[in-house]
Image (tube, helix red, strand yellow):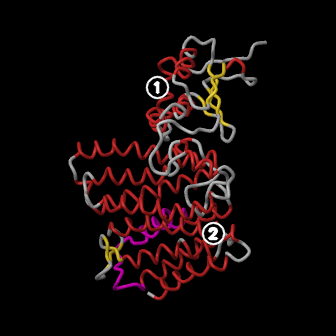
Amino acid sequence: MLPIALVALAVLLRPVRLTGGAARDGQARLAGALLATGWNVMVLGPLNATGLWWSFQAEGGVVAGVPVDLLLGWALLWGALPALAFPLAPMPLVAAGLAWADLALMPLAEPVVRLHDGWLVGETVAVAAGLVPGLLIARWTVQGRRLGVRAAAQVVLAAGLGLAIPVALSGVWRQPGWVLGLAVQALAVPGALGLAAVREFRDHGQGTALPYDPPRVLVTGGPYAYVRNPMQVAMTLGYLVIAVLDVRFLGAAALSFAYGAGLAAWHEGGQLARHDGWEAYRGRVRAWVPGTRPDMPPATVHVSATCGRCAPVAAWIERHEPVRLRVVPAETHPAGLRRITYTRGDGPPEQGVAALAHVFTHLHLGWAVLGWLLMIPGLTRFAQLAGDAFGAAPRDVRPPA
């Protein structure tokens, strides 16, 4: 396994070299390397476990029939190595070179690797689903491009490596359908919390959840107005839900909490301390136990005062005494509006159901959870279509002449 050792050595030494005089560039490359490697682990692990195109003859260090050292070596070769060693090389050339090397080496790996008929199809799937997306994610991370794609890729990675693969390996999915249905519904709450936190980082912090690809500014809105560590809280709660079905996930919950309270708090605390307002924010918002009322940044919601369906909505919002949210007649907006519109100074405006979901986060924790659920991709669009069908269709609201 000499090639694996060489790749591992490159992963360990390359970031050290990059830190001299180019810390930010080195941090971006390390983030790209981690994401690309994790992506390939997530893709290549299940692909190898299927046994459709090749199988393995190995003893010890095997999970689901796949040698762990071989899987990690493959993921490092396709992920960390190109991200760290060839960050500026033409990507098609890098992808072609790594794919060609794999095609040449796979037949030489016998008897550890036994190739089946049609193994070239499996190789094509691996390149298309693992190698190429991993290279793109790493390249965009280094270049600071495609923020939405990078954030989405990290969500997929967290769900795949942190939830889907452990659940598949544990066999917890063999529970009766009604039990799994209840578990999925219970997981919706921590899932919505985590997704809302990622969205807050993307929209209002211009960064991602990865410590080496962080937001550019201090993020204190959305879930962060209730608790300082919403992503760690979401992951820990998710494991606790699954632990009801399989007690082994209590260990995963403990590890998640230990990571969030220890290593992540130490590393991220050092980064956050450089932001203005961090000490004051830390004094107002707890780390792990959400508050019932938020510490939100100021925002404005425009609601029509002349629309018979809309005016009661504005009155309902004001009755709930929202925190740092101004309710303003939509007729006063200089550009003219067609839906209820929510705006914050550090992010894009939201309209319709999405605006109402953000309004909920200014009320209290119970309404905020509903708002985060409504922000789940796809559900917002469905709720908007349903609302339009029942009379909440857009209408022109113009400022008075």
Q: In the rendered structure, which amino acid carries the disc numbered 1?
A: Ala
Counting from the top left corner in percent of width and height, residue 349 is at: 65, 34
- Quarter of the picture containing the N terminus is bottom left
Dominant SS type (magenta): helix
Q: Amino acid at mark 2?
A: Arg
Q: Position of residue 79 (x, y in %)?
A: 54, 71
Bounds of the magenta span? 108-133
Secondary structure under the numbered disc 2 in the rendered image: helix
Q: Secondary structure at mark 1?
A: helix
Q: Is residue 309 above or below residue 206?
A: above
Question: What is the residue that sits farthest to the left in this orientation?
Answer: 176
Q: Is residue 17 left or right of residue 335?
A: left
CB contact under 8 Å: marks 2 and 1: no
Residue at image position (45%, 63%) is 259
Classify residue 212 as left or right of residue 372.
right
Q: Dot 1: within a 10 Å radius of its alpha carbon, few (fewer than 14), some, or many (20 or more) residues?
A: few
The answer to if 208 sits in the magenta stretch is no
Quadrant into which the C terminus falls? top right
Is 152 in front, or is 367? 367
Magenta-span inclusion, residue 114: yes
Q: Residue furthest right?
A: 401
Which residue occupies 57% across, 76% down? 81
Q: Earlier in the sequence, mark 2 or mark 1?
A: 2
Relative image position of residue 292 (x, y in whole percent) = 47, 37
Q: Residue 29 bears which disc, if any?
A: 2
Q: Quadrant of residue 107?
A: bottom left
- Labelled disc at residue 386: 1
Label 2 crowd bin: few (<14), some (14–19), many (20+), radius 10 Å: many
